[in-house]
Image (cartoon, rainbow, N blue to C red):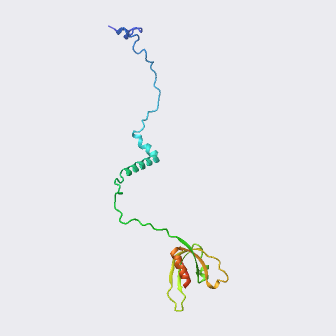
């Protein structure tokens, strides 16, 4: 026996329940084609490493912040000082060497004519005695700062040169210049 189709006005809901005013599916829209859309990407997950590579500065800054926080957390907890090896001797502070300009009269004026500002010289003192004596080095590696023009009347007494030396060396140069003839050796 063949099954006859139901008439379009027949509603299953109306036949099953007298309380339902509409048939099921009558409130749903008609079917249509779904539009194409780009895939949805969830932030984080497997893309986090790629994002860190792209933003290297942020990654380095974050790494430094984490390292600093770890160092502060692992720092000394005692009030008596830092952990590690004890300091045997306190660190000595070296005073900065104070250089001064020392004018020095060199016995040989022609040697001074060879000097230019910035040259390094050793100053040698030879005693002015008839018996002679041993020459000694008074200043080592002194920097020439100025070579003044010689005066006509002082041509026989040598030439003047200004040297930049530490203060104790300047005192030795002044003392040696009073008792000995001074000469320079270009370094």
Q: Residue furthest left?
A: 1
Left or right: residue 19 versus residue 100 is left
Residue 5: tell me if it is visible: no
Image quadrant assignment for residue 17: top left
Counting from the top left corner in percent of width and height, residue 95 is at 47, 68
Q: Residue furthest front?
A: 79
Query: Which sits in the foreground, 30 or 56?
Result: 56
Residue ID at (56%, 82%): 177
Q: Residue furthest bottom?
A: 131
Q: Image height check: is 45 above or below 154?
A: above
Residue ID at (56%, 83%): 178
Counting from the top left corner in percent of width and height, residue 20 is at 38, 11
Image quadrant assignment for residue 34: top left
User: Which quadrant of the rendered structure holds the N terminus?
Assistant: top left
Count all numbered tags in the image, as a single digit: 0
Residue 137: tell me if it is visible: yes
Q: Image height check: is 66 above or below 81?
A: above
Left or right: residue 39 versus residue 104 is left
Query: Which sits in the foreground, 72 or 5?
Result: 72
Residue ID at (53%, 85%): 126
Counting from the top left corner in percent of width and height, residue 118 is at 57, 72
Residue ID at (53%, 83%): 125
Counting from the top left corner in percent of width and height, residue 71 is at 38, 52
């Amino acid at each position: 026996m063949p099954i006859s189709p139901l008439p379009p006005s027949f509603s299953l809901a109306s036949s099953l329940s007298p309380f339902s005013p509409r048939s099921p599916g009558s409130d749903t829209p008609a079917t249509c084609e779904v539009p194409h859309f780009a895939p949805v990407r969830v932030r984080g997950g497997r893309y986090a490493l790629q994002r860190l590579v792209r933003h290297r500065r942020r990654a380095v800054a974050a790494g430094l912040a984490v390292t600093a926080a770890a160092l502060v957390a692992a720092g000394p907890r005692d009030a008596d000082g830092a952990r590690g090896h004890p300091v045997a001797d306190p660190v000595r502070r070296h005073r900065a060497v104070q250089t001064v300009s020392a004018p020095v009269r060199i016995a040989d004026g022609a040697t001074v004519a060879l000097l230019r500002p910035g040259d390094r010289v050793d100053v040698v003192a030879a005693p002015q005695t008839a018996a002679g004596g041993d020459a000694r080095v008074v200043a080592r590696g002194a920097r020439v700062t100025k070579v003044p023009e010689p005066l006509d009347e002082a041509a026989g007494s040598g030439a003047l040169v200004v040297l930049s030396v530490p203060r104790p060396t300047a005192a030795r140069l002044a003392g040696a210049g009073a008792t000995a003839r001074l000469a320079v050796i270009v370094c």
